[in-house]
């Protein structure tokens, strides 16, 4: 709108009309869904941004789009929450969340955060399947790649039928240090190539360095 200053974006009416026309294109269906809502309500229910929904509609990725004759323009568009739930980016990605990684690796929250931020663990954007809030998960294949490089003290202890403390003490005596992590990080992760022979299937045959 003219006269509102340089910081206010200006959109040509023809462009706005074209976009609204694309959003308002109705798709016919024999069995219309019962959960049709406007885009604003859909955003709240799906914990997403309006741009994500608009982008799906414009790219013709949404099967059901309705038009409320009692509303105008953008506010008249109706979409199905259940349909969109499976089409938004990062939704339904299966992987290990932070809580599961802590359990698998015997580390704490700061350690998981460090491993991801330092690039040791590759995290993929996802959403909580219940709350739909943004979350990050580590895909099984990325977790397997991590285990190709590192092994937790707990895994070594389980292999030897002993305790993590015993393994850590013995490795320390041998001059083998765990991965260096910042203060506040709890857990001991070792270079697999140093403490074990390389085994892609993770059969983890003990290295002589650990003793019998």
Image (cartoon, rainbow, N blue to C red):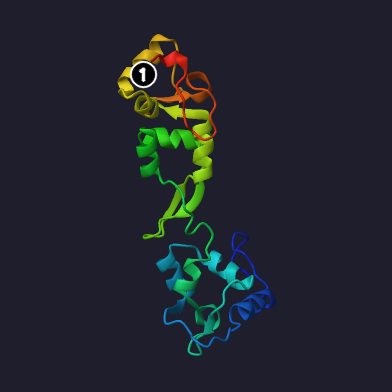
Quadrant location of the C terminus?
Answer: top left
Q: Residue furthest bottom?
A: 69
Q: Left or right: 33 with respect to 157? A: right
Q: Quadrant of residue 44?
A: bottom left
Residue appearing at x 37%, y 13% in the figure: 170
Note whether residue 1 is visible.
no
Give whichever of 9, 61 is nearer the camera: 61
The secondary element bearing badge 1 is classed as helix
Give the percent coordinates (x, y) of residue 155: 39, 29
Q: Left or right: 87 with respect to 81? A: right
Quadrant location of the N terminus?
Answer: bottom right
Note whether residue 154 is visible.
yes
Residue appearing at x 64%, y 75% in the figure: 19
Give the percent coordinates (x, y) of residue 208: 46, 15
Residue appearing at x 39%, y 34% in the figure: 105
Q: Please name the residue that numbered disc 1 is placed on.
A: 168
Q: Quadrant of residue 163?
A: top left
Give the percent coordinates (x, y) of residue 180: 45, 22
Q: Left or right: 7 with respect to 174? A: right
Q: Quadrant of residue 81?
A: bottom left
């Amino acid at each position: 709108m003219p006269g509102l200053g340089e910081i206010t974006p200006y959109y040509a009416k023809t462009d706005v009309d074209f976009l609204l026309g694309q959003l308002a294109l109705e798709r016919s269906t024999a069995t219309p869904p019962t959960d049709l809502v406007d885009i604003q309500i859909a955003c709240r229910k799906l914990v997403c941004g309006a741009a994500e929904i608009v982008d799906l509609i414009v790219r013709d990725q949404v099967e059901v789009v309705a038009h409320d004759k009692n509303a105008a323009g953008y506010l008249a568009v109706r979409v199905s929450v259940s349909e969109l739930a499976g089409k938004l980016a990062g939704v339904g990605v299966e992987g290990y969340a932070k809580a599961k990684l802590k359990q698998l690796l015997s580390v704490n929250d700061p350690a998981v955060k460090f491993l991801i931020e330092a690039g040791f663990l590759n995290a993929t954007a996802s959403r909580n399947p219940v709350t739909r809030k943004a979350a990050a998960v580590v895909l099984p294949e990325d977790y397997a790649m991590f285990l190709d490089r590192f092994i937790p003290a707990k895994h070594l202890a389980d292999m030897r039928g002993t305790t993590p403390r015993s393994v850590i003490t013995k490795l320390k005596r041998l001059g083998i240090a765990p991965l260096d992590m910042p203060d506040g990080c709890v857990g001991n992760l070792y270079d697999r190539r140093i403490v074990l022979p390389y085994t892609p299937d993770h059969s983890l045959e003990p290295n002589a360095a650990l003793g019998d």
